Structures are given as structure tokens and as C-alpha cells.
Amino acid sequence: MMIKNICCIGAGYVGGPTMAVIAQKCPHIKVTVVDLNQDRIKAWNDTDLSRLPVYEPGLDAVVKEARGRNLFFSTEVDQAIDEAEMIFISVNTPTKTYGVGKGMAADLKYIELCARQIAKVAKSNKIVVEKSTLPVRTAQAIKDILNHTGNGVDFQILSNPEFLAEGTAIEDLFQPDRVLIGGDSTKEGEKAIQCLVDIYANWVDKDKILTTNTWSSELSKLTANAFLAQRVSSINAMSELCEKTGANVNEVSKAIGMDSRIGSKFLKASVGFGGSCFQKDILNLVYIAKSYSLHEVADYWEQVVIMNDHQKRRFAKNIINTLYNTVSGKKIAFLGWAFKKDTNDTRESAAIYVANDLLNEQAMISVYDPKVSQEQVFFDLNYLETRTAEENSKLTHVEMDPYKAIEDSHAIAVLTEWDEFKTYDWQKIYDSMLKPAFVFDGRNLLDKNKLEAIGFIYQSIGS
Ligand code: NAD
Ligand code: UGA
């Protein structure tokens, strides 16, 4: 069967870019991305492409080419489900904040709502594709709901986890290391898998399209994120030891990364990993292991998150200790609020937690990020519920101009590795600060020698 109509439920950081690329690469397929969030859909349809709800380098060009041709963004969920032969579920699967598994398990309520809606609306056979990251064996639950509440049509469930990283999403989608598709090994299952393989084969080499059973596919996604995050926690653990021993973590990282068995990627020490997925997915993995009474497995992976929390806290603590054990009333400038460069996403960003610890010590924080709005910074701080919104707005300022954010501050904390920070006039910045002027480089981004020559007291992670 040739797929002519695709529907994607969820127009977020995954649904939007992924479907935009499928539509661009497959002009013969109509792709409709639907979401309950009207503002988000409105933003996806904005004629001013700088106002798309997701900032990703290259995304605007892809949307420009396909939108209105065979790519559509809509709030008409039922209509899009009805028309499609293949439905991707790309809704959010956050950590549960209530009930059994609170703070650990993935909250599958949005997934279940999608399954029930598909069952209710579908009057012809559908292939349902899990694009969201899900606990292993979720496909079984989706299948049960579809088959017990549906209209007697046939549903095939595929798992097709997404491996893109934010900030490089378009590149990752154009040239993925692999595309993973899991499905049933029945005749119908294999046919459904082939339909999805045919879509990706429009631009991805066939030998990079990997097909597996459903459970391997679901579990591989959690495993990949756990391994990546583990590398960051491993190098961050070494960064603390480097600081105590005079070793330099960048040198250690280079030395071990040249071993082809280890490899050089994901070995950059930092203030800690952020983003909506690493922590959520590892906690989910820990929860799954515990639910099978695999306590050693659970403890092993939980340590990755424990180490990451420690790294964020230790960075804030170091700022306080270095500034003579008090930051009360002192202005500290934050360069960066997003969880990594080239994204406007701030979910679980280390900056939020470092800010929280400093605000608890009554520091005055002044934030500059090239892509994050003032509204978002206050949303993130207020969401923690550590202080009232009024207290947060008294202690925190968000500036559009980095020089203004830094002026009259005691210290700068680099929280995101935006390239533009390297291009600043650092002499001018030094002259505008109170002395002694400190830089706490949470990303090992800036040139230590250059800053020290100007007069800064410079500290980076792990050296
Ligand atoms: P997101 O929050 O940006 O987007 C999810 C969207 O789904 C929201 O706009 C929400 O309004 C919508 N939604 C929720 N329930 C709905 C419903 N019943 N009907 C219609 N719309 C609904 O989330 P995201 O970052 O795109 O992540 C989605 C999934 O993809 C998660 O499972 C995540 O783990 C996974 N993932 C994310 C990334 C990433 O880089 N962000 C990468 C790989 C995988
Ligand atoms: C990550 C994975 O890389 C993707 O493959 C996956 O699809 C995605 O999670 C997901 O499932 O959501 P993402 O979180 O967007 O992608 O970005 P990463 O590049 O992985 O960075 C995550 C965090 O780790 C960032 O805060 C980054 O600054 C930090 N990091 C990364 C380091 O501190 N050091 C490194 O060496 C690499």
C-alpha cells in the first residue's frame, strides 16, 4: 500500500520538524500536523517564519517550501485522523507529577487520549506510529484500546522513535544515523513496517533503516538516551576529580575520546545536562526496572540523574563560595537560559536550577539569552514554586542586550554554549563590571588565557 495521507498528533519540538521534513522530502504525501493547542498551530501557520513556535536552524526554509503545498497545521484533529492512512503520535510524555510512579514514571495520559480518539474516529484501517518516547510495551496498551473501543477496523501499531537532537534537528532528520522501525512479525505487521520504510526511503539510505520487533524498538529509544546521558554524567563526575587533582577535564576528555572504542562525542563536561528528555527517560527506565524488581539495574541508571543534580548544585555552590560566601544583593549575569545552543527550549535547563540556588541566597540575577523570552524565564522560575512570582520578579531581570545584562555585575555565569558569547568585546565587558570580576564558565566555552589577561578571575568546569 502507498501512503498518501499522514496525520501527526502533536505539533511540538518533534512533531513539527519531523513532519515538515517528511512533507518536504515526499511531495506526493499530504501531511497534516494537528494539536489541541490553538496558539501553537497559529504560530506554525504564521507568515512571519521567525515566529514559528520552535526555533531550529534550517526549519524555516523547510516549512517555507512545504507549507500550503503538502504540509498543513490544523486544530481539526478528527478530520485529520479520518483522512489519514498513517497516524503518528508525537504528543508529550512527561514525568508523572501525581499518584503511583510520581516523579519517575512517564505520564501516558496524552497517549491514551490519542488512542481513544483514533479508535472513535477511524472508519478505515490505520497504521498508528508511536513517535513519542514510550515505556517498553506501550504498544500493547495502545493496541488494546484501539481494538476494544474501535469501530472494527484493523490497526497496526509501529514504534518509530525519534533520535533528533534539538538545535540540529533538521540536519539530524536529513541525515539520520539510523531510522528505527519496530512492528509485529505477522504478515500485516510486516506490510505496515514496509509502508513506513518506503516513506523514509525517499531520502534515507536503505541500510540505515533498521527494522526490529516492537519491544526492541521501544526499549532502544530509552537505552540510547540513557547511554548518552550516562556519558555526560561520567565526564562530569571526572570534572570534579579534575578540580581536586590539577588534571584538566578537557585534556582528559580528548585523551580518552581518541580511543576509537570510546569515541569523542558526548564527552564535554558541563554544568549538567538539561532538556525535556534525558532525565525523564532515565527516570522512566529506572521505574520500569523497579517494576520488574530489577533493583540493581534501577540503581545503576538512577545514579546518572543523581550525578547530574549534584553537578548543577555544585556549580551554584562554587559561585557562592568564590564570591566570599555571600551573594546577597550581588548582581550575577547569566549568559544563556536555553538548555543548549541553537534552541529556544528551556525545559529542565541547568540555568533554572543554578538560578534557583542563587536566588535562595538573595542574589540579583540578570539573564540574557538570544532566543529565550522574558516571559519564559519567569515561567520557568515560577514553575518551581520556591518563591512567589513577586519575589522572583524583584530579584530577576531579563535583558535583550548582553552588555546591559552584565553591566555592574560581580560575576558572569555561562549557562548555554551560544556561539555569539565568544564574539563579545570582553575588554568592554570587564570595564563595565564591579571588581574583582569573575567568570564561571559552565560550558568551558570561553578562552581562559584571554580573559585572565584582561583581568578576569576565570573558572571553568573541571580545571
Ligand atoms: P512538546 O510538548 O513540544 O509537544 C507535544 C505536543 O502535543 C504539544 O503541543 C501538545 O499540545 C500536544 N498534545 C498533547 N496531547 C494532545 C492531544 N490529545 N491531541 C493533540 N495534541 C496533543 O513535546 P516534544 O518535545 O515534541 O516531545 C514529544 C515526544 O517526543 C515526547 O515523548 C519526547 O520524549 C519525544 N522526543 C522528543 C525529542 C525532543 O528533542 N524534544 C526528541 C526525541 C523524542
Ligand atoms: C537528546 C539526544 O541527543 C537525542 O538523540 C534524543 O532524540 C533527544 O535527547 C530526545 O529524546 O529528546 P537533546 O536533549 O535535544 O537530544 O540534546 P543533546 O545534544 O543530547 O543535549 C542534551 C543535554 O546534554 C544538553 O543540556 C547538553 O548541553 C548536554 N551535553 C551534551 C553536555 O553537557 N555534554 C555533552 O558532551 C553533550
Image (tube, rainbow, N blue to C red):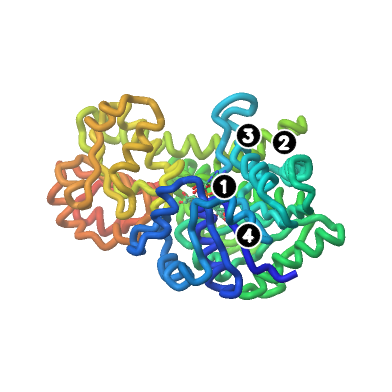
- Depth-wise, is mark 3 or mark 4 nearer the camera? 4
- Depth-wise, is mark 1 or mark 2 nearer the camera? 1
- What crowding class fits label 2: few (fewer than 14 Cα within 10 Å), some (14-19), or many (20 or more)? some
Dot 1 falls on a residue whose secondary structure is: loop
The residue beneath circle 1 is 91
Quadrant placement of the N terminus: bottom right
- Tag on residue 105? 3
Dot 4 falls on a residue whose secondary structure is: helix
Quadrant assignment, res 390: top left
Dot 3 falls on a residue whose secondary structure is: loop
Q: Nearer the viewer, residue 148 or 23?
A: 148
Residue 393 appears at what percent x and percent y? 25, 32
Q: Ligand 1 near label 3 (Cβ, under 8 Å)?
A: no
Dot 2 falls on a residue whose secondary structure is: helix
Cα–Cα span, label 2 and label 4: 39 Å
Instruction: Check disc 4 and give the amino acid type.
Output: Glu
Cα–Cα span, label 3 and label 4: 33 Å
Cα–Cα span, label 1 and label 2: 24 Å
Residue 259 appears at what percent x and percent y? 61, 62
- Depth-wise, is mark 1 or mark 3 nearer the camera? 1
Residue 347 appears at what percent x and percent y? 45, 43
Quadrant assignment, res 50: bottom left
The residue beneath circle 2 is 289
In this view of the protein, can residue 236 be seen by the observer?
Answer: yes
Question: Between disc 3 and disc 2, whose residue precedes?
Answer: 3
In this picture, is 240 found above or below 168? above
Residue 117 in the figure: left or right of residue 60: right
Question: Between disc 1 and disc 3, whose residue precedes?
Answer: 1
Q: Nearer the viewer, residue 209 or 83?
A: 83
Residue 308 in the figure: left or right of residue 374: right
